[in-house]
Image: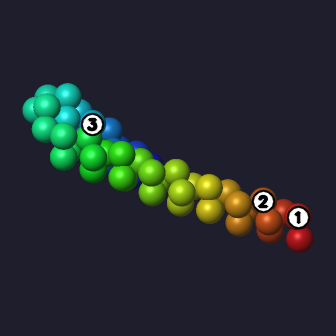
Amino acid sequence: MLLLLAAGVCFAFYIGTGQARYRTWGIVILKWTVIAALGFFGVLALERLL
């Protein structure tokens, strides 16, 4: 949840300032959050199957 909040703050800074580095950071944080969530739920699903 904190990573989603951090990505949201980065996107808000991008909207407020117009600097592309905040958008880039927001996308990177969001990408790794999704990867971590998929890994977490993948482990849960695999545990459920075994």
Left or right placement of residue 38 versus residue 14 in this view: right
Q: Position of residue 14 (x, y in %)?
A: 19, 35
Tag 3: amino acid = Phe
- Residue shown at 89% from the left, 71% from the top: 50
Q: Earlier in the sequence, mark 3 or mark 2?
A: 3
User: Are discs 3 and 2 less than 8 Å apart at CB?
Assistant: no
Disc nearest the viewer among 3 and 2: 3
- Residue at image mark 1: 49
Q: Residue 26 got which mark?
A: none
* Helix, strand or loop at mark 3: helix
From the viewer's perspective, tell me whether residue 11 is left or right of residue 17: right
Q: Is residue 10 above or below residue 46?
A: above
Which numbered marker is on residue 11? 3
- Distance, label 3 to label 1, CA atoms, is 38 Å
Residue type marked 1: Leu
Residue occupying image coordinates x 27% and y 50%: 25
Measured Cα–Cα span from mark 3 to mark 2 = 32 Å
Q: Earlier in the sequence, mark 3 or mark 1?
A: 3
Occupied quadrant, residue 37: bottom right
- Assign a secondary structure to mark 1: helix
Q: Residue at x 67, y 57 (%)?
A: 41
Which residue is disc 2 drawn over?
45
Tag 1 near tag 2, CB within 8 Å = yes
Residue 22 at x, y percent in the picture: 21, 44
**Real-space Cα separation, disc 1 to disc 2, in angstroms:** 6 Å
Which of 45 and 24 lies nearest the eye of the viewer? 24
